[in-house]
Image: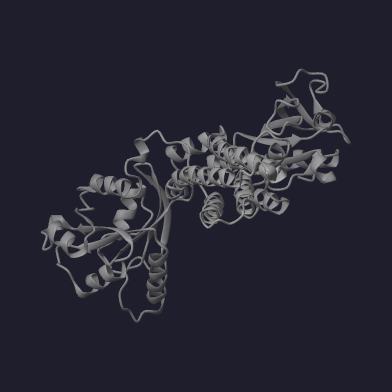
Amino acid sequence: MVQTLTEFDTIAAISTPIGEGGISIVRMSGEDAVKIANKVFKGANLEKVPTHTIHYGHIIDPKIEKVIDESMVTVLRAPKTFTREDIVEINCHGGIVVTNHILQLLLENGARMADPGEFTKRAFVNGRIDLTQAESVMDIVRAKTDKARQVAVGQLEGGLLEKIRAMRQEILDTLANVEVNIDYPEYDADQITANQMATTSKSVIKKIDKLLKTAQEGTILRNGLATAIVGQPNVGKSSLLNYLTQSDKAIVTDVAGTTRDTLEEYVSVKGVPLKLIDTAGIHHTDDKVEKIGVERSQKALKQADLVLLLIDSSKGLSDADQELIKETANKKRIIILNKADLGSKISPQDMHKLTGSDVISTSILKEENLDELEDLINKLFFSGIENSNEQIMVTNQRQSALLKKAKRELEEVINAVESGIPVDIAQIDFNGAWDTLGEITGDSAPDELINQLFSQFCLGK
């Protein structure tokens, strides 16, 4: 990877959320980090203190010798730092004005404002982490459940990196034999080499398939499961949202149609992160505002990974309910027969025979059988993964797409060998698979990809 001059600058950024808080942290990384910090710090000579030490003092404006804030400053010398460069972290009082003032002082005294994700990018460029570990940094920050955090920590420790590099090494070992055969054709070992390529391809494909089986779970853990709560007006959708979020996010009354727009909220259900979408009741209406809400509900329904379809069991199955059953037939869904406390005219058994879906009977008002609903959600998507020991997962579309691409290239190698195509032609896809797997870890990723990936990070990370 080609480094530009700006990648050797000393960078600075605020690493904590902007706003009122106990403390804020302003971070610098680069060759001049300690020198710059020493210009604005009064309390110790930071250029002479031992590495990995923290020092009490005051941040001052050197132009006017005015104290800006009381602070604790941490000095971390390369190479044993996150970026493998000198790092200084200034812990100051939380607050927008004081934090920004300190950042401006650092910029005025020689630092450059960091780009989004530039600290993590430097850790990658300097060889401390690979791309899968870099992505796991943001996964830890964004983790919505403890399981998601555990998986992200596993990635940060290099779990996926080890598996990908083991596959690349397997391909590389075979490629060495291929190159020998091409360079020394007098040995006439074409068929032996071709068979080795096919055998290695099949072996690596099995490993890729095993990783791809984790892709759905990994993506859900990373992004949350889009879950639409749908049903007729006044069937209990908002009550279910409030129960799952343990709050009063939605208005609940006995008046039909109080939800006129989609409401979204993240919640963890038995380790499954759900992006809950409480929809307006899907029904025919002439009310312009309510009609917009219904249209948005239908859009949310189409985009949902999981549908929680509520039916008022005390009234029986209406034509509108049957229409919703048809609309959600191709979705993963759980049918909830609500208001069982008022007497049920539909049994879970009959509904299951009619739809083939998981069905529970409940009274959301009285919180009956809602534990069963949570168990069904977990079972439907993870089959007990919350209690499994699997910590290595494919967690995003980039990794998944590249694994699929490498698999296709290896399949082409197998087809070429079985068709009797010359080894040097089949080797093209074999080399391609090796490069594609390298894109996952960053070993062979183009600069454009690197820059795009890190631009998605937040400032100060």
Q: Is residue 360 visible?
A: yes
Q: Percent x, y for residue 152?
A: 51, 38
**Depth order, front residue of 304/42:** 304
Q: Quadrant of residue 30?
A: top right
Side of 459 relative to 325 (left or right): right
Residue 440 against residue 235 in the figure, above or below: above
Color scheme of the displayed model: one colour
Q: Percent x, y for residue 389?
A: 40, 33
Residue at image location 85% in from the left, 44% down from the top: 5
Pick the quarter of the image with the N terminus: top right
**Depth order, front residue of 358/104:** 358
Q: Percent x, y for residue 55?
A: 72, 21
Q: Quadrant of residue 283?
A: bottom left
Side of 161 relative to 71 (left or right): left
Residue at image location 35% in from the left, 67% down from the top: 280
**Depth order, front residue of 309/419:** 419
Q: Percent x, y for residue 158?
A: 57, 34
Badge count:
0
- Which residue reaches farthest right? 63
- Which residue reaches farthest bottom? 286
Residue at image location 48% in from the left, 50% down from the top: 223
Side of 131 relative to 325 (left or right): right
Q: Quadrant of residue 318?
A: bottom left
Q: Is residue 261 visible?
A: no
Pick the quarter of the image with the C terminus: top right
**Depth order, front residue of 412/310:** 412
